[in-house]
Amino acid sequence: MEQIDLTTPITPPATTNYRVVRLFLDWPNGLINIDLVDENGKIAPFQYTGAEATSLMLFLNTANLSIKSLHRRVLEKLVADGKLDGTISGTP
């Protein structure tokens, strides 16, 4: 499974990576909720709203997921937006 390996671990407790466990797309309300889980089982929530969420959903709806997985795209977006800092590893 793909995960993001954090550049700087978060403490306490030691958190070195996250993986996607939940992705909620709410088209009518322009809302994306993303839940990641760390190796300790703790959930880290992230959210996009409004026009930004709608644009992301339109992009994801037409993305070629045979080139890059949905999980990888979500993790890459969180890194690109500065919400997380790390590298993505693993396979879908």
Image (tube, helix red, strand yellow):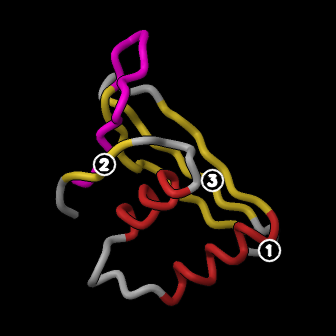
Q: CA distance from mark 1 to mark 2?
A: 33 Å
The quadrant the C terminus occupies is: bottom left
Callout 1 touching callout 3 (CB < 8 Å):
no
Q: Which residue is mark 3?
A: 33
Q: Which mark is residue 28?
A: 1
Q: Which residue is mark 2?
A: 87
Left or right: where does residue 32 sit relative to residue 83?
A: right
Q: CA distance from mark 3 to mark 2?
A: 21 Å
Q: CA distance from mark 1 to mark 3?
A: 14 Å
Amino acid on which the number 3 mark rests in the picture: Asn
* Residue extent of the magenta highlight: 1-15
Q: Earlier in the sequence, mark 1 or mark 2?
A: 1
Amino acid on which the number 1 mark rests in the picture: Pro
Q: Position of residue 19 (x, y in %)?
A: 35, 45
Residue depicted at x 31% and y 75%: 68
Q: Is residue 81 magenta?
A: no
Towards the viewer: 51 or 20? 51
Callout 1 touching callout 2 (CB < 8 Å):
no
Callout 3 touching callout 2 (CB < 8 Å):
no
Towards the viewer: 12 or 20? 12
The residue sitting at the left extreme is 91
Q: Is residue 8 magenta?
A: yes
Q: Position of residue 70 (x, y in %)?
A: 39, 69
Residue depicted at x 80% and y 74%: 28
Q: Secondary structure at mark 3?
A: strand
Q: Position of residue 54 (x, y in %)?
A: 72, 75
Q: Residues within 10 Å of mark 2 (few under 14, many from 20)?
A: some
Left or right: where does residue 18 sit relative to residue 50?
A: left
Amino acid on which the number 2 mark rests in the picture: Thr
